Image: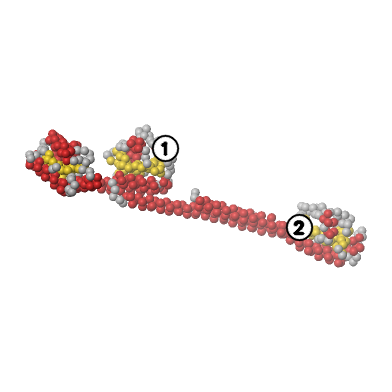
Amino acid sequence: MTTRQNKKDWLIIILLMCSFALALFFAMYGKVTLFPAIDSLIISMKEKEAVQIGNYLKNTLIDDLALFRQETLPVENENIIKNAALDFALLKIKVFDAAGRTLFSTSAEDIGVVNQSPYFHNHVAKGNTLTYLVHKEDPSLEDQAYGRDLVETYIPIMENGKFHGAFEIYYDISKEKQLLNQLIRNASLLAGGVSLLLFILAISITIQAKRYLHLIQDAKDKVSQRNNELYILYDLSKVLGRSLPVDALLQNVLQTLLSHLAFLDIHRRGVAFLCHNNTMEIIAQLGVDPKHLSCQQGLDPLQCLCGKCANEGGLVIVDHCQNALNEQEKVPLSSYDHGHIILPLKTEEKVFAVLCLYTRPDITVSEDYHELLESIGNQVGVAVERSLAYSELKEVSLHDPLTGLPNRRLMEDCLQQELSLFHRYKREFSIIMADIDHFKNYNDQFGHAAGDKLLCSIAKIMQDTVRDSDLVARYGGEEFLLVLPETNSIDAVLVAEKVRHNIELNCEVCISCGVAEFRTKMTLSGLIEIADKALYSAKESGRNRVVSAC
């Protein structure tokens, strides 16, 4: 996976985590934030009401602060407090003296009880209002259980900075808190539900986005692959568009493919086989062990995978060459493990050659690349067919169709090359002009078919007699011209005598020869003219002999 794809995946993960966190936040917001906020609001509101009620009771009941030093409150004061509790819908009202003793309570069991708690003496007695929210499952500040939600507030009674007593007012907030809590729960459920839906929607969008991202990435990869394939085919077309002999053509094809197909784990090793006469001839190679090549030269097509590819005409991909060979396939393996991609180079009618590319072992080639490889095989196959046809046509155009010897055009090219070598390196060369004696009489006596056969026999004798580096050309009719590189006139006469002698022994006719060595300031036409004059002298001297112009 590419770095860009990893970044996209991380972005998707972060979006999902944010969506989940948002859903969790809304779900927990009520419990973590709203409930404490509501409690604080209730405490604040009830504390204000309690202070107002405390001030009201203080102003209504107390004419003399000495009241808080009595054992109990007067009855009329008690009635006022009871009525206030009813009027203000209070759960309880208590009156304390400065020592914390309960002078009066709307609950009779509280009268006379002394509040010794630190909060009373350290906080309320200092003139501070104290409000506390009591949940129904918790005890009050005075450790009393009520089984309901309460707000209890202590309102100190101060005069000139001196603490004289306090009112304690209890509010029953069970219904209000229940309604508020239910409202908060409903709001939290709604927010949580919306958050869950948003989270599910985010997951759905993320899945779709990831799918589309993958589709986009796949499309980009395919476009990149197609561009790469076009680039390969473009570079290959530049090679195939050149007029090259088939060996040079396939060598260039190997170099191009091995440099462009690295993404298929191809090593820089490959062999090109030319298929003809039921054999596999190595015509080009790159980076392959010579010992291994020598074992593959001239193979029977049934002995190797390349031969199978040539016979079947289909692409062959082998992940491990040892696994693909059976007992009948006797091709020695190279010293290193490898796989193969083998391309038949063919047209619709025939496989002309096979390209064997070496890969790392256990290779897997995607089906997407099969079409590219087959296209390469077809294009190169057409180029190989064209190159072979061109070579064949060139061979025909430069050789005599009867004897197979080079014709005058190829002879002239050879002479021109020898001339260049003479001028550059002072390399000597000579020519022999040979003519069959009384060839017309032979044709008249035995017929033209026999004459043609005789020409072919003489051509073969000449080729067998001279060196491989020498050129034997049919000059025209019954005349032949031999080009002898690095040969002076004396050695050329010996060669001519040997040729003449072999023809005399093996044929029913004889030949006459004229020899000439190229000299400075000569021309090629002048050289041929001198040799021709020497040949004429041999004819005039009685035929079946060699005459040197030098």
> What SS does tag 2 mark?
helix
Image coordinates of residue 148 in percent, x first then y, are 77, 55
Q: Is the C terminus in the top left, top right, bottom left or bottom right quadrant?
A: top left
Compared to residue 548, the image places residue 62 above or below, namely below
Q: Which mark is residue 93?
A: none
Q: Is residue 226 left or right of residue 277?
A: right
Amino acid carrying mark 1 in the image: Asp
Q: Which mark is residue 337?
A: 1
Q: Is residue 409 left or right of residue 161?
A: left
Examine the rendering and report whether any part of residue 140 can be seen: yes
Is mark 2 in CB contact (under 8 Å) with mark 1? no
- In front here: 141 or 189? 141
Residue at 92% across / 60% down in the picture? 70
Image coordinates of residue 142 in percent, x first then y, are 83, 54
User: How many other residues sit within 10 Å of disc 1, few (<14), some (14-19) or many (≥20)?
Assistant: some
Residue at 31% across / 51% down in the picture? 241
Compared to residue 316, the image places residue 185 above or below, namely below
> What SS does tag 1 mark?
loop
Can you tell which quarter of the image residue 335 is in? top left
- In front here: 31 or 378? 378
Amino acid carrying mark 2 in the image: Ser
Q: Is residue 407 left or right of residue 206?
A: left
Q: Is residue 235 left or right of residue 71?
A: left
Image coordinates of residue 104 in percent, x first then y, are 88, 59
Residue at 42% across / 37% down in the picture? 337
Q: Residue beneath label 2, please? A: 174
